Image: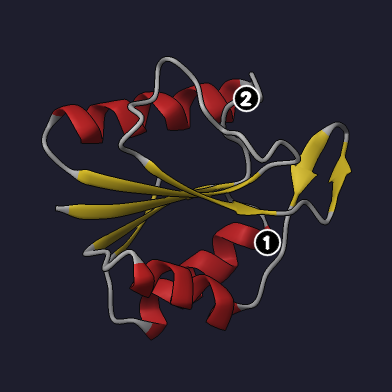
């Protein structure tokens, strides 16, 4: 299964969303899924020893932050292009922010099953 995980918080950030999302990515990888991560990050290197190096990571720049939490935005078409380039079969959305809405719309545009986690 080819899964794209969309999140607004991922390593190297250490908050609840980043940790939970990273654990889910590990779980998907360990069960044989090919995993792509589309995340907001100020750090271009989202590498972490807990995340397999074979996990593909794409970066969206942050739009800003609220109470220290990154907020990102992109167009539905741009996110859909990145999901399509990964040849995803499932899109997991790990944010309820603006990026989550955009990712859900992109998945529907591509006729892929979105999963809000």
**What residue is pinned by disc 1?**
98
> Label 1's element?
helix
Would residue 28 be found to the left or right of residue 85 on screen? Answer: left
Residue lying at 67% horizontally and 69% vertically, measured from the top left: 74
Examine the rendered structure and indicate whether residue 22 appears above or below residue 6.
above
Would residue 16 be found to the left or right of residue 67 on screen? Answer: left
Examine the rendered structure and indicate whether residue 33 appears above or below residue 75.
above
Say which label, 2 or 1, has the lower sequence index: 2
Gap between marks 2 and 1 measured at Cα: 21 Å
**What residue is pinned by disc 2?**
12
Mark 1 residue crowding within 10 angstroms, few (<14) / some (14–19) / many (20+): few
Would residue 52 be found to the left or right of residue 9 on screen? Answer: left
Residue lying at 87% horizontally and 41% vertically, measured from the top left: 66
Give the label on residue 8, or none. Answer: none
Q: Residue furthest top?
A: 49
Look at the image and tell me in which quarter the C terminus lies.
Answer: top left
Residue 53 picture quarter: top left
């Amino acid at each position: 299964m080819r899964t794209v995980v969309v999140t607004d918080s991922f390593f190297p950030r250490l908050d609840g969303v980043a940790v939970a999302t990273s654990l889910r990515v590990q779980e998907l990888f360990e069960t044989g899924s090919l995993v792509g991560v589309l995340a907001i990050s100020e750090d271009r290197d989202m590498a972490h020893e807990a995340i397999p190096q074979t996990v593909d990571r794409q970066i969206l720049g942050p739009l800003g932050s609220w109470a220290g939490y990154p907020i990102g935005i992109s167009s539905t078409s741009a996110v859909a292009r990145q999901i399509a380039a990964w040849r995803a079969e499932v899109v997991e959305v790990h944010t309820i922010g603006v990026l989550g809405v955009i990712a859900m719309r992109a998945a529907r545009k591509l006729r892929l099953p979105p999963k809000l986690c």
